[in-house]
Amino acid sequence: MEKYSQFRDKGSGIAPFFPAASQASGLYMPLHIFLFLFRLPILVTVTLSYFFVLQWLPIGSLGKKASLWMILGVPSIWWIDLQIDGVKKGSLARHNKARLPQPGSVIASSHTSPIDSLYLAAIFDPVFTASYPYTRQVQRISLFQALLRSFAVPQSSPPKNAKLVNIGTLIKENSNRVIVVYPECTTTNGRGILPFSPSLLTTPPGVKIFPISLRYTPADITTPVPQTYFTFLWDLLSKPTHCIRVRIAESVYNAKQIPPTTGRGSYSSNFLDALQDDTASSTDTLLGSEDGEGISVAEKRVLDKVADALARLGRVKRVGLGIKEKSDFVGIWTRQRRR
């Protein structure tokens, strides 16, 4: 494993690109095989029905969300552990407009699995985007493309024919929808937060940016290594059930003068999730940009605050390994597995 030591963060020792180990089936292997064989044709049928038929029908946002929940229901992804900064359990109805992403806002989400996009689509019906480490612009993509990117080789630059736009432009064109940004630009195993793309900096001042952390139990349905289709399907369909841990932080603004907040947010049920002071972090910014001088101090504070929020929500640390290191890791990992 010495050849992989370069892919551990020097400060923390975290390795964000290694696939999560699956728990051995043992005596439950017959049950897991049965669940896999029983669910696979159902999942294929429901998924193809949605992407080739239902999403093109005039069934409205509610109909699309119900269809996506059917897809999530096949592998029994029913258990959602949701906590929101500043909202006590059982009191969400009184705070939903202020504390949850609404049309015209931006979601800055962690990215570890294809389930990320499915869940966000089933809840918010958003516009998905692809971010790249060396540009502030984003590429608008469909839900299906977002799912495929979860299995794709890391891309440090957009395709030649990609249409890039600012987040502000997307908000104007889709004022009745939420915009989803994956600022890490690629998937990880959920054990660390990668350097950010500067794409969030094109969010207009006054528009809320909601950091959202998504984590899974068991954790083996993450896809940090590209093209692991069968492994993902086996881990997804062979287990009796899965739980999604969803954490939503207080909104962040891309502005020098941030509007006043309603107070210090906290998770009332979990002391470990206590919220830090509502000011941008003073830690060194970890960016995915080659030209760090092109980002002002105020902009660095915005990116720092979003990254720190994602790290806090996921109970992980920020790391200095980016998309270049992941590309190198994937090359070595792939060659090793072919031997």
Image (cartoon, helix red, strand yellow):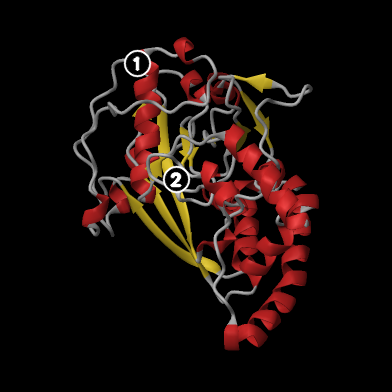
Say few, some or many: other residues with alpha carbon within 10 Å of mark 2 (under 14 / 14 to 19 / 20 or more).
many
What is the number of the mark on residue 12? none
Q: Which residue is mark 1?
A: 298
Q: State whether residue 178 is above or below residue 40.
A: above
In-image side of 224 versus 279 (left or right): right
Q: Which residue is mark 2?
A: 192
In-image side of 45 versus 172 (left or right): right
Report, in whole angstroms, how far the alpha carbon at label 1 lies from the one at label 2: 24 Å
The x and y percentages for residue 137 are: 59, 20
Instruction: Residue at 56% x, 21% y: name it.
Output: 172
Quadrant (top left, top right, bottom left, bottom right) of the N terminus: bottom right
Instruction: Residue at 57% x, 26% y: name it.
Output: 133
Say which of 215 and 231 sits in front: 231
**Viewer-nearest of discs 1 and 2:** 2
Quadrant (top left, top right, bottom left, bottom right) of the C terminus: bottom right
Which of the two discs, 1 and 2, labels the residue nearer the N terminus? 2
Q: State whether residue 332 is above or below residue 179.
A: below
Q: Secondary structure at mark 2?
A: strand
